[in-house]
Image (cartoon, rainbow, N blue to C red):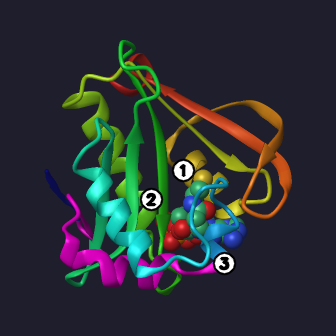
Amino acid sequence: MKLTLKSCTLRNLKVEDAESLAFHANNPEIAKFLRAGFPSPYRLEDAITFINNTKQTKHLNLGIEVDQEICGVIGLIYHHTKIKEAELGFWLGETQWGKGIITEAVRGIVDYGFNKLDLNRIYSSCFIDNYGSIRVHEKIGFKFNGIEKDVCTNAHRTESRHYEMLRSDYLI
Ligand SMILES: CC(C)(COP(=O)(O)OP(=O)(O)OC[C@H]1O[C@@H](n2cnc3c(N)ncnc32)[C@H](O)[C@@H]1OP(=O)(O)O)[C@@H](O)C(=O)NCCC(=O)NCCS
Protein backbone atom coordinates (compact mmCIF):
# COMPACT_ATOMS: atom_id res chain seq x y z
CA MET A 1 0.00 0.00 0.00
CA LYS A 2 1.47 3.33 -1.08
CA LEU A 3 -0.05 6.80 -1.39
CA THR A 4 2.19 9.30 -3.13
CA LEU A 5 1.40 12.88 -2.11
CA LYS A 6 3.19 16.15 -2.86
CA SER A 7 5.07 16.55 0.43
CA CYS A 8 5.31 12.92 1.54
CA THR A 9 4.56 9.29 0.74
CA LEU A 10 2.33 7.15 2.95
CA ARG A 11 3.44 3.54 2.78
CA ASN A 12 3.67 0.24 4.61
CA LEU A 13 6.46 0.06 7.16
CA LYS A 14 9.46 -2.24 6.77
CA VAL A 15 11.76 -3.44 9.53
CA GLU A 16 14.54 -1.35 7.91
CA ASP A 17 12.51 1.74 8.91
CA ALA A 18 12.85 0.94 12.62
CA GLU A 19 15.84 3.20 13.24
CA SER A 20 14.35 6.35 11.73
CA LEU A 21 10.95 5.56 13.27
CA ALA A 22 12.52 5.28 16.74
CA PHE A 23 14.60 8.43 16.17
CA HIS A 24 11.53 10.56 15.43
CA ALA A 25 9.20 8.87 17.93
CA ASN A 26 11.60 9.19 20.84
CA ASN A 27 10.47 12.68 21.76
CA PRO A 28 8.45 13.68 24.85
CA GLU A 29 6.90 16.51 22.78
CA ILE A 30 5.21 13.79 20.71
CA ALA A 31 4.44 11.33 23.52
CA LYS A 32 2.70 14.00 25.60
CA PHE A 33 -0.02 14.35 22.97
CA LEU A 34 -0.55 10.60 22.44
CA ARG A 35 -2.51 8.22 24.62
CA ALA A 36 -0.96 6.17 27.37
CA GLY A 37 0.61 3.17 25.67
CA PHE A 38 2.82 5.12 23.28
CA PRO A 39 6.31 4.21 24.56
CA SER A 40 8.31 7.04 26.08
CA PRO A 41 11.26 6.78 25.87
CA TYR A 42 10.72 5.12 22.48
CA ARG A 43 13.47 2.59 21.81
CA LEU A 44 14.56 0.72 18.70
CA GLU A 45 12.84 -2.44 19.96
CA ASP A 46 9.57 -0.49 20.35
CA ALA A 47 9.82 0.49 16.69
CA ILE A 48 10.55 -3.09 15.62
CA THR A 49 7.59 -4.39 17.65
CA PHE A 50 5.30 -1.71 16.19
CA ILE A 51 6.41 -2.44 12.62
CA ASN A 52 5.96 -6.20 13.07
CA ASN A 53 2.50 -5.64 14.56
CA THR A 54 1.44 -3.57 11.55
CA LYS A 55 1.89 -6.69 9.43
CA GLN A 56 -0.42 -8.80 11.57
CA THR A 57 -3.33 -6.49 12.18
CA LYS A 58 -6.49 -5.41 10.40
CA HIS A 59 -5.65 -1.76 11.13
CA LEU A 60 -4.07 0.43 8.48
CA ASN A 61 -0.88 1.93 9.90
CA LEU A 62 1.30 3.69 7.34
CA GLY A 63 4.69 5.29 7.67
CA ILE A 64 5.01 8.93 6.59
CA GLU A 65 8.07 9.09 4.34
CA VAL A 66 9.80 12.40 3.64
CA ASP A 67 13.14 12.54 1.77
CA GLN A 68 13.39 8.72 1.74
CA GLU A 69 13.06 8.55 5.53
CA ILE A 70 10.14 7.50 7.73
CA CYS A 71 9.44 10.37 10.11
CA GLY A 72 5.91 9.67 11.34
CA VAL A 73 2.92 7.37 11.31
CA ILE A 74 -0.68 7.81 10.24
CA GLY A 75 -3.37 5.21 10.68
CA LEU A 76 -6.96 4.14 10.51
CA ILE A 77 -7.83 1.92 13.46
CA TYR A 78 -10.82 -0.41 13.39
CA HIS A 79 -12.40 -0.79 16.83
CA HIS A 80 -15.55 -2.47 15.51
CA THR A 81 -14.95 -4.90 12.69
CA LYS A 82 -18.55 -5.09 11.50
CA ILE A 83 -19.07 -1.35 11.27
CA LYS A 84 -17.49 0.51 8.40
CA GLU A 85 -15.82 3.16 10.46
CA ALA A 86 -12.32 3.78 11.73
CA GLU A 87 -10.41 6.01 14.12
CA LEU A 88 -7.77 8.30 12.67
CA GLY A 89 -4.43 8.68 14.44
CA PHE A 90 -1.19 10.41 13.48
CA TRP A 91 2.11 11.82 14.66
CA LEU A 92 5.02 13.45 12.87
CA GLY A 93 8.66 13.91 13.89
CA GLU A 94 9.40 17.38 15.23
CA THR A 95 12.02 18.13 12.54
CA GLN A 96 9.20 18.08 9.98
CA TRP A 97 6.59 20.16 11.82
CA GLY A 98 5.16 23.29 10.28
CA LYS A 99 5.49 22.22 6.63
CA GLY A 100 1.89 21.21 6.03
CA ILE A 101 2.89 17.53 5.80
CA ILE A 102 0.33 16.24 8.29
CA THR A 103 -2.46 18.28 6.77
CA GLU A 104 -1.73 16.68 3.40
CA ALA A 105 -1.27 13.20 4.91
CA VAL A 106 -4.60 13.39 6.75
CA ARG A 107 -6.37 14.57 3.60
CA GLY A 108 -4.79 11.65 1.73
CA ILE A 109 -5.79 8.96 4.20
CA VAL A 110 -9.31 10.37 4.66
CA ASP A 111 -9.76 10.29 0.89
CA TYR A 112 -8.45 6.72 0.79
CA GLY A 113 -10.73 5.71 3.68
CA PHE A 114 -13.89 6.94 2.00
CA ASN A 115 -13.07 6.18 -1.63
CA LYS A 116 -11.09 2.95 -1.43
CA LEU A 117 -12.00 1.39 1.94
CA ASP A 118 -15.62 2.43 1.62
CA LEU A 119 -15.81 3.70 5.20
CA ASN A 120 -18.97 5.43 6.39
CA ARG A 121 -17.35 7.41 9.18
CA ILE A 122 -13.89 8.47 10.28
CA TYR A 123 -13.51 9.75 13.83
CA SER A 124 -10.65 11.17 15.79
CA SER A 125 -9.74 12.91 19.02
CA CYS A 126 -7.00 15.05 20.49
CA PHE A 127 -6.18 16.43 23.91
CA ILE A 128 -7.70 19.86 24.57
CA ASP A 129 -4.30 21.60 24.63
CA ASN A 130 -3.07 20.07 21.35
CA TYR A 131 -3.57 23.23 19.29
CA GLY A 132 -1.68 21.85 16.26
CA SER A 133 -3.93 18.82 16.03
CA ILE A 134 -7.07 20.90 16.64
CA ARG A 135 -6.10 23.09 13.70
CA VAL A 136 -5.41 20.06 11.47
CA HIS A 137 -8.91 18.68 12.20
CA GLU A 138 -10.49 22.05 11.47
CA LYS A 139 -8.58 22.49 8.22
CA ILE A 140 -9.62 19.08 6.92
CA GLY A 141 -13.27 19.76 7.78
CA PHE A 142 -13.86 17.35 10.68
CA LYS A 143 -16.97 18.15 12.70
CA PHE A 144 -16.39 18.88 16.41
CA ASN A 145 -18.40 16.39 18.43
CA GLY A 146 -17.82 17.40 22.03
CA ILE A 147 -15.43 16.97 24.91
CA GLU A 148 -14.63 13.80 26.81
CA LYS A 149 -13.46 14.30 30.37
CA ASP A 150 -10.90 12.32 32.32
CA VAL A 151 -8.76 10.82 29.55
CA CYS A 152 -5.47 9.17 30.47
CA THR A 153 -2.26 10.38 28.78
CA ASN A 154 1.25 9.08 29.38
CA ALA A 155 1.75 11.66 32.10
CA HIS A 156 -1.58 12.79 33.55
CA ARG A 157 -5.34 12.89 33.13
CA THR A 158 -6.86 15.45 30.80
CA GLU A 159 -9.78 16.06 28.43
CA SER A 160 -10.16 15.21 24.76
CA ARG A 161 -11.86 16.96 21.86
CA HIS A 162 -13.74 14.52 19.62
CA TYR A 163 -14.16 14.91 15.87
CA GLU A 164 -15.86 12.99 13.10
CA MET A 165 -16.39 13.06 9.36
CA LEU A 166 -19.21 11.19 7.66
CA ARG A 167 -18.96 9.68 4.22
CA SER A 168 -22.15 11.52 3.24
CA ASP A 169 -20.57 14.86 4.17
CA TYR A 170 -17.27 14.06 2.44
CA LEU A 171 -18.53 12.77 -0.89
CA ILE A 172 -20.83 15.67 -1.76
C1 LIG B 1 -0.03 17.75 15.62
C2 LIG B 1 1.07 17.62 14.57
C3 LIG B 1 0.83 16.36 13.78
C4 LIG B 1 0.99 18.86 13.66
O1 LIG B 1 2.04 18.79 12.74
P1 LIG B 1 2.44 20.05 11.83
O2 LIG B 1 3.59 19.63 11.04
O3 LIG B 1 2.59 21.25 12.67
O4 LIG B 1 1.11 20.21 10.93
P2 LIG B 1 0.93 21.15 9.67
O5 LIG B 1 2.22 21.73 9.24
O6 LIG B 1 0.16 20.35 8.68
O7 LIG B 1 0.06 22.35 10.26
C5 LIG B 1 -1.32 22.25 10.46
C6 LIG B 1 -1.87 23.54 11.04
O8 LIG B 1 -1.70 23.52 12.47
C7 LIG B 1 -1.11 24.73 12.88
N1 LIG B 1 -0.32 24.44 14.07
C8 LIG B 1 0.66 23.52 14.20
N2 LIG B 1 1.13 23.52 15.46
C9 LIG B 1 0.41 24.46 16.14
C10 LIG B 1 0.40 24.93 17.48
N3 LIG B 1 1.24 24.41 18.40
N4 LIG B 1 -0.48 25.89 17.82
C11 LIG B 1 -1.36 26.39 16.92
N5 LIG B 1 -1.40 25.99 15.63
C12 LIG B 1 -0.52 25.04 15.24
C13 LIG B 1 -0.28 25.17 11.70
O9 LIG B 1 0.02 26.56 11.77
C14 LIG B 1 -1.21 24.81 10.55
O10 LIG B 1 -2.27 25.74 10.42
P3 LIG B 1 -2.26 26.87 9.28
O11 LIG B 1 -2.07 26.15 7.98
O12 LIG B 1 -3.58 27.52 9.42
O13 LIG B 1 -1.09 27.76 9.58
C15 LIG B 1 2.47 17.51 15.21
O14 LIG B 1 2.69 18.65 15.98
C16 LIG B 1 2.65 16.27 16.05
O15 LIG B 1 2.96 15.19 15.56
N6 LIG B 1 2.49 16.43 17.36
C17 LIG B 1 2.70 15.33 18.31
C18 LIG B 1 1.75 14.14 18.12
C19 LIG B 1 0.32 14.57 17.98
O16 LIG B 1 -0.11 15.53 18.57
N7 LIG B 1 -0.43 13.79 17.19
C20 LIG B 1 -1.85 14.03 17.03
C21 LIG B 1 -2.58 13.38 18.13
S1 LIG B 1 -4.30 13.77 18.05
* Residue position for label 2: 103
Q: What separation in Å lies between label 3 and label 2 (alpha carbons)?
A: 22 Å
Which residue is more in the foreground, 128 or 13? 13
* Residue position for label 1: 139
Q: Residues within 10 Å of mark 1 (few under 14, many from 20)?
A: few
Asked if the residue under mark 2 is in contact with the one under mark 1, i.e. CB atoms within 8 Å, the reply is yes
Measured as percent of width and height from the top left, residue 71 is found at 37, 76
Comes first in the chain, label 1 or label 2: 2
Measured as percent of width and height from the top left, residue 163 is found at 62, 35
Comes first in the chain, label 1 or label 3: 3
| Residue 28 badge | 3
Residue kind at label 3, given as amino acid type = Pro
Which residue is more in the foreground, 97 or 70? 70
Ligand 1 shown in quarter: bottom right
Question: Residue at the spot x=27%, y=72% of the render?
Answer: 65
Q: Is mark 1 within 8 Å of ligand 1?
A: yes
Which residue is more in the foreground, 63 or 54? 54
Comes first in the chain, label 3 or label 2: 3
In the image, is residue 26 part of the stretch drawn in magenta? yes
Asked if the residue under mark 3 is in contact with the one under mark 1, i.e. CB atoms within 8 Å, the reply is no
